Amino acid sequence: MSIVSAIIALGVLALIFGLVLGFAAVKFRVESDPIVDQIDAILPQTQCGQCGYPGCRPYAEAIANGDEINKCPPGGEATIKELADLMGVEAKPLDSAHGEEAVKTVAVIREDECIGCTKCIQACPVDAILGAAKQMHTVIAHECTGCDLCVEPCPVDCIDMVAERPRPETWQWDLGQIQQRHPEAQAIPVKMVE
Amino acid sequence: MRGNISDIEAGVIWTFPGGIHPPERKQPASDKPLRRIALPQQLVLPLRQHIGQAGDLLVAEGDRVLKGQALTKPGLTNGLPVHAPTSATVIAIEPRATAHPSGLSELSIVLSPDGEERWIEKKPLADFRQHDRAELIATIKAAGIAGLGGAGFPTAQKLAQQKPLDYLIINGVECEPYICADDRLMREHAEEILTGVDILLHITGIEKALIAIEDNKPEAIQAMRDAIAERSQFALRIVPTKYPSGGEKQLIQLLTGRQVPSKGLPMDIGLLMQNVGTAFAVKRAIIDGEPLLERVVTLTGEALQQPGCVWALLGTPIAHLMEQAGFTPDNLPRVIMGGPMMGFTLPALDVPVVKTTNCLLAPTEKELPPTRQELACIRCGACADVCPASLQPQQLQWLAKAKDYDALEQQQLFDCIECGACAYVCPSEIPLVHYYRKAKAEIKNIAREKAKAEIARERFEARQQRLEREKEERLERHRKAAEARQKAKQEAQQSGAEDPVQAALERVKRKKAEAANAEAPATNDKPQKSAAVAAAIARAKAKKAKQQAADAADNEKDES
């Protein structure tokens, strides 16, 4: 008898908690950030296609479907590490088949040589090239991701990829670099002798 | 926190954690009166002299400019104009090395002074109480005044904020060793400084200003005390000598016992701080109508024959100042801009004086020996004891070396004021501040990259959408055109009219026949007449067909 009542009591409890949990699962449902968006947020958004996909989002989708995480040269080690953390896999070195991690560049059109063919405009994945047919084109430098995709279609080879120059506000306190140029420079504060 | 007005009024001086007592070494520079130096051959004015954006150029190469004439116009963001410090000719507008530890160049205006000192027309607002707040703030902005104490934050922007404020704090502490620019200014221009403070009080609507001076400047204290006399809107506060009591957050804690919240501003706790030099510049801008053209620069260090404080025009090359002060380089020639704690060694001497240049220190090797090799951290904790922001410098150092930026932010790296007290006491000679600066720059860069990536993503997606839309529109157009053609054909069949193609074929046939007829010799009138009739009919038919074809084409165009 006691067993029966215990089973009934436990059964009723299980039912109540089950209902509560079931209700909570529906009522307080948390819409989690879809994994593709999270991956896309980590990728550097150069849209360069070096991974073999037409842009960062398609690569994010591919990663979500199990593709390798080491195909993004612009992102480099840092991106691979973040992706590894997110996906719960081992970080691997960059797959050199897709390119090497290089310094950041921007495209610059040699404007007097431009013939106005609009081919680079069509190639630019972020619409960072301005111009019209038979008019000179130019790159909006601060919108350029340095993806390189405009160089290939240019029929007169008037696009250069130029390394981004450091400006005082983006300078990285690389004192070693200064010391090479000016050996007398040194870190502050200077120790004072009593 | 804000209920402690009575304590503040009573003149209580609170304390702040940490701090150090380095040798002051204010003499001999602080004993010499302020002097003016010879005009340099060239003045180099970087367009950007302070926090904020550079303005747009108003002059071109070859222009003659008058003293006080604005050379740039600030854009919409927090920029400030720069002015011609003397009448001169613009000889170049080009990138020149700027007063920045990197030694990188920035777009600068190069002036060749003509020595005539011809002023532009001044527009003083001598009776400042008759002018409203907005007008005074606009004048201060147009005068290009940036905070002359440290970071060079645009003064007008600081004043434009509207928040209830209890006190205006005037910072004359100048706690860093060697520097005595504010000290000299207070000794010699106390009355003008107070006029400036009065203007600031009028603009902000604050009732009382606390003027803080460190107790190692008795002459400055005396001068200010005499100038203040019995005026109740000013109160003098003498703070004990300790570095960095002149730091904004530290001085606020000393005078009011309040703490500026992390990532907050003094304004959030009802306070506003301005440097004495800034107050003086405000007086000059409002009462005399003179924009910020010069500032006091301390020239000091044992490598200088004539140390002292000088009025230096903005843009004066450091090399010229060094020459005027009798720079005799030893075997370790260095010129430090700013003090020995927070300054930086100049990579070259061709850089100009900017709005934030308060001191140029040229020490001998013996005076300030170079730092030795960095050794391993021995976890002595001395740095944590002296940190005025109550941070854990050794912890920050480990994290900065490991590039663990998330943890650095958790450890409040951005509360670090880079005062250098930790590095000063470090027995292992670790350049701690350098690691923090590097990490801060890196974190800011990552944030900038992230923001840029976000914009690139938006642009990419917008482009994808546009391509998609264009493709759909093209397909739709083709579909509609095909439909229109179909419809025109059907209509033509229904109305019994001839198919335009058929009509055209017939026309051609007829023309051929006509040509054949024309070739054949005319036999009689009748066939000729019938030929003329036939031609007329054909013409009418052709016209009709043409009309139809045009209609169809119009329809097609309309629909597409």
Image (spheres, coloured by chain):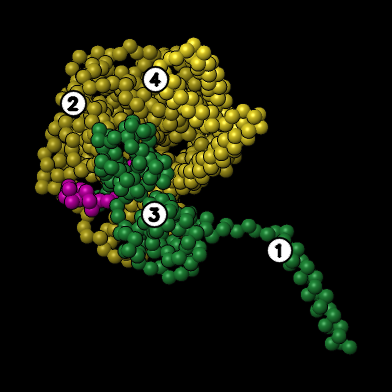
Chain colours: A green, B yellow
* Distance (Cα) linking label 2 and label 1: 74 Å
Task: Look at discs 3 and 1 and give the one toward the viewer.
Answer: 3
Q: How far apart are marks 3 and 4 (CA)?
A: 71 Å
**SS state under label 4:** helix
Q: In which quarter of the image is the C terminus of chain B?
A: top right
Q: Is residue B493 left or right of residue B341?
A: right
Label 3: which residue?
Answer: A49
- What range of the chain is rendered magenta? A169-186
Q: In which quarter of the image is the N terminus of chain B?
A: top right
Question: Do discs 3 and 1 share a chain?
Answer: yes
**Relative vertical location of residue B490 with respect to residue B512 in this rendering, above or below:** below
Spatial CA distance of label 2 from label 3 is 51 Å
Tell me the kind of residue under disc 2: Gln
Task: Look at the numbered discs 2 and 3 and tell me whether their residues touch, using CB distance below 8 Å.
Answer: no
Image depth: mark 2 or mark 3 in front: 3
Q: Disc 1 on helix, strand or loop?
A: helix
